[in-house]
Amino acid sequence: MKKSNSLNGKIRFFGFLFILPAFILVLFTMIIPVGWNIYLSFQEWNGASAMKFVGISNYIQVFSDKATMRSINNSVKIAVVATIFAMILGVFLALMIYKVSKREGAFYRFVFYSPAMLPMTVVGLLFTFILASDEGLLNNILIAIGLESLTRPWLAAKGTVLYAIGFVQGWRSSGTIMMLVFTAIIALPKSLSESAELDGATYLQEVRYIILPLIKPTIILSLSMMIMWAFKTYDIVAAMTGGGPGDLSKTAPIKIIEQAFTSNKYGFAAAISIIFALIVIALITIVRKGLKGEAYEY
Amino acid sequence: MKKNVLSLLLAGIMVFSLVACKSGQSADSEQESENSGNGTSEQAAETGGTSEGKTDLVIIITGTDEVCPVIEQMVLDKFGDKYNITSKTWDESAVEQTVKTAASAGEQIDLVQYWPNQMNSFTSAGLAMELTGYMDDEWRETFNEGALEIGTYDGILYNVSYNSVYPMIIANTDILEEAGVTISNQPTWDEFIEACKQVEENTDAYGAIINQDWSCWLVRNGIMQAWADDEKLDAFNAGAISFEDPKIIAQLDMIADAFNNDIFYPGGEAALAVPLDQTYAAFSANKAAFLFMVNTVTNDALKSSEIENYQIIDWPAMGTNPTNPLLGGCDGYFIPTCAQNVDGAIELMRYLTSPEVLTVRAEYGMIPTAEIGDSENINQELMESISRCVSQVYPTEIINIDADLAQYLMYSMPANYIYDKDSAIEEMETYRKNAVGE
């Protein structure tokens, strides 16, 4: 018994030593900044003079300020579009790649995953040129194939700018979703698909009745991660539209930066960020609870 | 036993590598500080101080204009032996954030280039150093009349200007000729719009192009020129007049009509989202007759667009005020309160506003606000045409009363007005009332 306790103690000690560097990193890059942000959200501070405790007035101001609520609304719209597009495209690509040969599959995986390797700012700048009204590639292709009526000022029109940003973000993230789902699919026992084939099931039936139900936990995980990523819109929006024209595409992260560094309202900016984070957490929780279903063992 | 030793060794290597990374960063920054005095631009050291008998000096003055590296080299040649100069790149979109972050962290930044008429976000937070006491008579006399007023807030000088900046227009006279249009150098807004319409009727080109970041000038000039005299203008600039005033609405409607009538390339809402490089590309491809431009980068714009036949036109008068006040200001320098080498910053500021440096700026097509020397390299004809309106530049603007209102007018207008007129007026009015305590 003594020897067992001593061994457990040693294991715990060495375990603690190994996680210590990572824990220190997480402490200083995440836990302390988040705690400081929560504290700051109850203060009025212009960055130079002393802080003043103001209770929940910053939070009240967030909900009463139309421009702030609009920016949060814009963030949610972009996130929804990006998530839906990334998930549908990612799962579709994974299912298609699963059926091709190994060599071809490796090539396609590289091609479809490569957007995820590009920095978001580079992707944003690239699509600024593609979506430009006059000299943009998309509008010129539409004109060339006789669909001039479909041309739009994609990044300037009220009805298209948020969707355009959402699609770009979704496209970039679809590669990562594809890889996660593909990894889950190839982990499934081959015997299941073989027996389905013997029973005369088509690939579509196999996908619907076997593959998708069995990879559901991975899909839920991918969805949670995608929702988190989709709300991080500062870099892509800054690169594509800068939040404009006007406030059309101004998202919560841009509003936070503006309130902190231009308006010198650090407390208000912190309150926006806390509420924004709570919205993201709530969405992820709802999605996870909503999609939770039966678990399968195989 | 072997496993224990191996585990300890692995844990020790991980901890050591973390410590080594930190030491590596410190060594790099020391090396960079050493190099910076020899003429290279590097990242600043974390704290001010001295090394090798030279005090540190951290500056953010070097932008992307053609003249900037030349000026930076002059600074390094002049002061490199006296100071360890670290020059960070000046980025319009990030300079404010950089300075405020540094101030919060107590990091050293000694001299920053910034617009004297937009200092309110620094002065309101106590982040700009008072320069009144450093401005002696000898230095003051080198400046043009009124040049220092623009960086003065409540009687205290915070920012010293070096360049006069205001918006104007470059006209492609080949397109105007094709359209059968003649326009004076100082048109009214109606004359300008009429000329644009004729261009669009008689050629394939649009009337005008304006960069998405500069479209706010239309609104800022419009609301400035809404008033019949300077007294009313001063009252408006102080926040005493509502944005719901019919004169303001009339000006904003006039601007919105120009966009709705496809005066601006490439027409419709898309004209609100044209980046600067696309404006140059479109202008050089003869897609519009008039290019809205800043006077100080006219030289660069003419080189980029390769337009040979052009006419410099003043901003169209949008009102009836006889003084025709013009939006504009200056480029200037200020010293943040996180500066740790104030004497060095003042010395550098004096040099940067001296005839030696300002003459070089004039050679690159800028309009200095202080004395310059003689130089054969100054294009006198261009200088005269892009400095015609210096005396019209109005020293105050309504954006000075509140940072939120400034942000709104500079980055959200005229788009917000075109998309939702009532909401835009309501928001501006809310910011105005908050600023004046109504």
Image: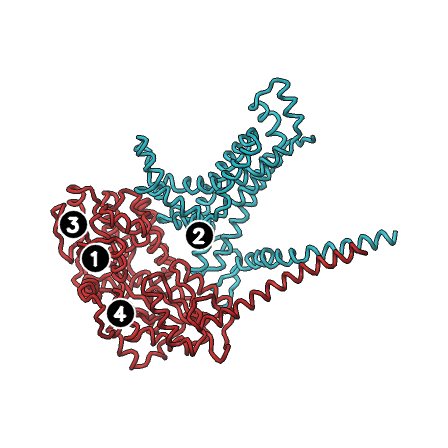
Chain colours: A cyan, B red
Please report contact status of discs 3 and 4: CB closer than 8 Å, yes or no. no
* Cα distance in 3D space between marks 2 and 1: 32 Å
Q: Is residue A84 left or right of residue B159?
A: right
> As shown in the figure, which amino acid type bears the numbered disc 1?
Trp
Residue at disc 4, secondary structure: loop
Name of the residue lying farthest toward the right = A1
Please give the label number shown on residue B315: 1
> As shown in the figure, which amino acid type bears the numbered disc 4?
Pro
Q: Earlier in the sequence, mark 3 or mark 4?
A: 3
- The residue identified by callout 4 is B368
Q: Earlier in the sequence, mark 1 or mark 4?
A: 1
Residue at disc 1, secondary structure: loop
Q: Is residue B173 left or right of residue A157?
A: left
Residue at disc 3, secondary structure: helix
- The residue identified by callout 3 is B174
Tell which subunit mark 2 falls on.
A
> As shown in the figure, which amino acid type bears the numbered disc 3?
Asp
